[in-house]
Image (tube, coloured by chain):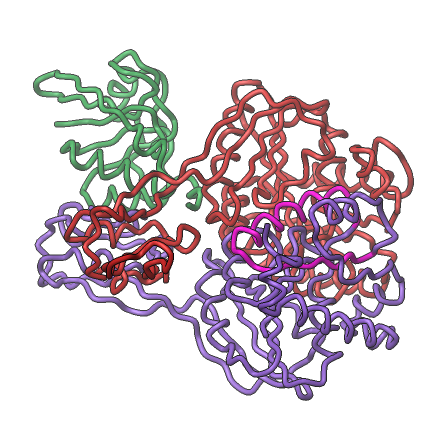
Amino acid sequence: MTVAIASGKGGTGKTTVAVSLALSQTVPLLFLDGDVEEPNAALFLRPRILGSRPVEVRVPEVDAARCTACGACSRACRFHAIVSLKSKPLVFPELCHSCGGCVLACPSAAIRESLRAIGIIERGVSGSIRFAHGRLNVGEAMAVPVIHALREDDTQVGLTIVDAPPGTSCPVVAAIRGSDMVLLVTEPTPFGLNDLMIAVGTVRKLGLPLGVVINRSDSGNDSVRAYCGREGIPVLLEIPEDRRIAEAYSRGIPAIEARPELRTRFGLLHRRLTELAAPEARELGVGAAS
Amino acid sequence: MKIVVSARTDGLEADVDQRFGRAARFVLYDTETKSVENVDNQQSLNAAQGAGIQAAETVSRLGAECLLTGHCGPKAFRTLAAADVRVYTGAAGTVTQAIDSFLQGRLKLAAAADVDGHWA
Amino acid sequence: MNVREMVVVSGKGGTGKTSLVGSFAVLTQSAVLADCDVDAADLHLLLSPAVQRRVEFRSGHTAAIATGRCTGCGRCLELCRFGAIRASVPSRETASAPQKPGFSVDPVACEGCGVCVDHCAAGAIDFPERLSGEWFVSETRCGPLVHARLGIAAENSGKLVSTVRRQARDLAQAGHRALILVDGPPGIGCPVIASITGATSVLAVTEPTISGEHDLLRVLELCRHFDIEAAVCVNKWDLNPEASARIEEAARVAGALLVGRIPYDPTVTRAQIQARAVVEIGGPAAAATRKVWDAWLAVAS
């Protein structure tokens, strides 16, 4: 089973929940930190890194000898990443989406694709947890190819936990697609509710079952709970505001180490997630897309 | 020679548009025939990304040798350079005033982009 | 007129960007406000905006296969690199005779590259413009606000962010306002890059945690990459004073200017629930926020 942990708003506690869920399990587990712009889970899981590989994307390279400056590549490109003027076409690699359109369009077979590194995937172990994260190179724009490369590592052994980036757009979609269950972590504030509603929209568009965790549950107002009730979204866990958790977090110590009694609650959470992700539950529409 | 000036509206009395990539119009002026042609840049205004590149392609296709504008970003500059279009920044006032300034050698030939790209 | 553009980012989400921008907006009263966190926009929740203009944001295209014209050759499936082409299985309920396989496009996965469109021998693929979201120009008690809403699961490559900034710049010129205040997104990818390029000064808001420090250093590296001056402020500093001091030192070493610290204060959330900025209510965070604003204003040149 693959569970993705996401949120609309940043800083609600995705990584706290993802790491705690991982550490409370005894099944074989794969932890993927999909927040490739700011990967933090390693600060808590402290994996021993065993290997890494670069994430490379394809960009066009023009053979000047074969190029006739016909401009077909330029006309084919919807992203202005290759521009043909008087002589050899100009390439803007940062705008390239690696679609291959220019290569196909060239009547002189003058374009081949070369690889450009935009990030890295690191793999390791933390106790019995298999771990991988992606890191986008600073200055690169596109997180999605790194997230796709990371998710290639999902070999479906037991439980896979994907720690998604904050937000609701393409990087989050790339991180949560194809998972069996999405857990949205929120906080009971107006910002939390606003962003939760957007995140719910994204998860429902993907047709995935979802549940909510309310973090710092006694710190705001009741509107998140009321919203979940109205929408039939199960609230699977509430974690009250706790200075001990906050302090431990600030030092890179996972919540269930600071508060061992949370272990049971995360164990229960796992059970509920399994129930909600099950095919029978999906057919009944329990906690799933409306 | 053919000169292109980035402009806010049409004609020689139009104000120079300080931006190149997302300029509203281009006014093409031929110094020999004294003819004036107005070219729309709507495509670039709406372009999701690479507006500067698209505008540069337009200018190149017009056969311009020189471009007069306020500011020019890096991608546009690179494209114009590849198309052998000389870029002069610091143009101001009306299109006529910009052309006069240029012909009297008062505009600066740009060696590089003079503003940051807007990414995307 | 020389317009200053001051952008607030964080690296890590949830450090308090939007709350701070709300307070800055109230303190200055003379800025054009821009919410560039387009996929999770919150600034409007503090400013009670009255929408004056609403514009559809169309960006890129999405392929759509016309089933009537499709011959089922599968070339689109071969060529698509984004997993956006699905083979559709004839429905058990409606098929009375064997049907040819059909293909359809998953609009969420479609990158808008047009390769399938260009290479479909039957010309069976349409390529309509994509409605990706909308942006708004609103009036608030602090001045004009440009904000946006990205479509559900839409591509957030920074294009809508650039549009919001452009509109804010046009408003500033037209309204003779010399300052644009931008609420930026978390992270370091396209939307953040689109928020900071060409800015006068960036303020990175962080928190005294190991994650906060890690993420701050990456966003400061991004600022250096684009040659933009960066200032740093530690929010909720008293949750871990040692970590706060460490982060400030790390920020200084990274070349950023320190503009102050703000204590943890439940008044911030109380204010948010009232749709107000904390400086409109008072308390320790409000007082510290004023000092941070003055300090940042002084260094942003």
According to the rendering, which colour does chain C have? Answer: red
Q: Residue at x 54, y 27 (%)?
A: C2
Where is C157 relative to B55, above or below?
below
According to the rendering, which colour does chain B have? Answer: green
Where is A115 relative to C268, above or below?
below
Q: Position of residue A148 (x, y in %)?
A: 46, 67
Is A211 displayed left or right of A160 in the figure?
right
Q: Residue at x 55, y 67 (%)?
A: A179
Looking at this view, is C39 or C209 the one in front?
C39
Determine if residue A163 is in view: no
Q: Position of residue A135 (x, y in %)?
A: 53, 68
Is A69 displayed left or right of B44 in the figure?
left
Q: Position of residue B16 (x, y in %)?
A: 34, 21
Residue C144 lies in quadrant: top right
Q: Residue at x 75, y 38 (%)?
A: C293
Residue C131 lies in quadrant: top left
Q: Which contiguous range is marked in magenta?
A: A188-216
Residue at the right extreme of this rendering: C283
Where is A171 relative to A126, above or below?
above
Q: Residue at x 78, y 56 (%)?
A: A214
Looking at this view, is C297 or C74 the one in front?
C74
Residue at the front extreme of this rendering: C96
- Write down which chain is painted purple: A
Where is C173 relative to A165, above or below?
above
